[in-house]
Structure formats: structure tokens, C-alpha cells
Amino acid sequence: MNDGTRKFRINEESDQEMKRILTTVYDALREKGYNPINQIVGYILSEDPTYITNHQNARSLIRKIDRDELLQELVRRYLSD
């Protein structure tokens, strides 16, 4: 019987790509005068791309990140410190 627990694995290459994309999105939001943390959190919670500016192709880039993988990585890093 399956207990419903899912296991996620993120390879290092995927982790580096996620970081590169988030950094680009963060910088684009900051350049446009937004609060990048609030905007990124809004996007993660809602998956509404309008939280992310089109500046520097940020909206397109953020959609390349799997939200489940992103959340897993954020929790892992938060708890490892």
C-alpha cells in the first residue's frame, strides 16, 4: 500500500540553474522597484505569473522552475543552517 509520501531529488545542476533563475528574477524585480521577496513569495503561493515582471525575461524564466522542487530546496536550506 502506498502511504502517499513523495520523495524529491534535486541534482546539483538543477540546483544551480534554479539559483541562476531566481537571482535573475530577483534582480529584475529590484530594478523595476518591486520588493523582490514579496513578489517571489506571491508567485510561489499562487502560481500567478503577474507577480513577476517581464523585465529581463523574468516572467518566462521563473516558469521554468518547478515550484515543488523550489519549495523543497528552500526548506532544505533553511533547516540546514
Image (cartoon, rainbow, N blue to C red):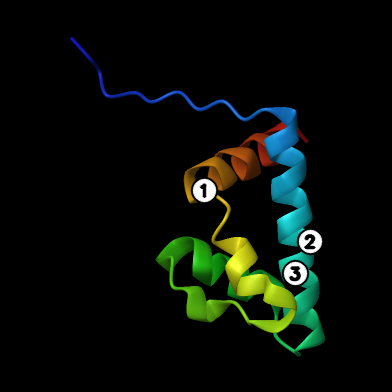
How packed mark 1 is, by other alpha carbons closer than 10 Å (few <14, some 14-19, many 20 or more), is few
Distance between the Cα atoms at labels 1 and 2?
A: 16 Å
Can you identify the residue that label 2 sits on?
23
How packed mark 3 is, by other alpha carbons closer than 10 Å (few <14, some 14-19, many 20 or more), is many
Left or right? Give the position of 22 relative to 49.
right
Between discs 1 and 2, the one toward the N terminus: 2
Q: Residue at x 50, y 81 (%)?
A: 50
Q: Which quadrant of the figure contains the C terminus?
A: top right
Q: Which amino acid, by three-letter code, is at mark 3? A: Tyr
Labels 2 & 3 near each other (Cβ < 8 A):
yes
Distance between the Cα atoms at labels 2 and 3?
A: 5 Å
Can you identify the residue that label 1 sits on?
66
Badge 1 element: loop
Q: Which quadrant of the figure contains the N terminus?
A: top left
Q: Which amino acid, by three-letter code, is at mark 1? A: Asp
Dividing the picture into quadrants, the one containing residue 51 is bottom right
Left or right? Give the position of 57 relative to 44.
right
Can you identify the residue that label 3 sits on?
26
Distance between the Cα atoms at labels 3 and 1?
A: 17 Å
Q: How many marks?
A: 3
Badge 2 element: helix
Q: In the displayed image of the protein, which residue is found farthest to the top?
A: 1
Labels 1 & 2 near each other (Cβ < 8 A):
no
Residue 46 percent coordinates (x, y): 41, 67
Between discs 3 and 1, the one toward the N terminus: 3
Q: Which amino acid, by three-letter code, is at mark 2? A: Thr
Q: Residue at x 68, y 74 (%)?
A: 57
Residue 79 percent coordinates (x, y): 67, 35
| Vertical relation: 32 (above or below) 44 | below
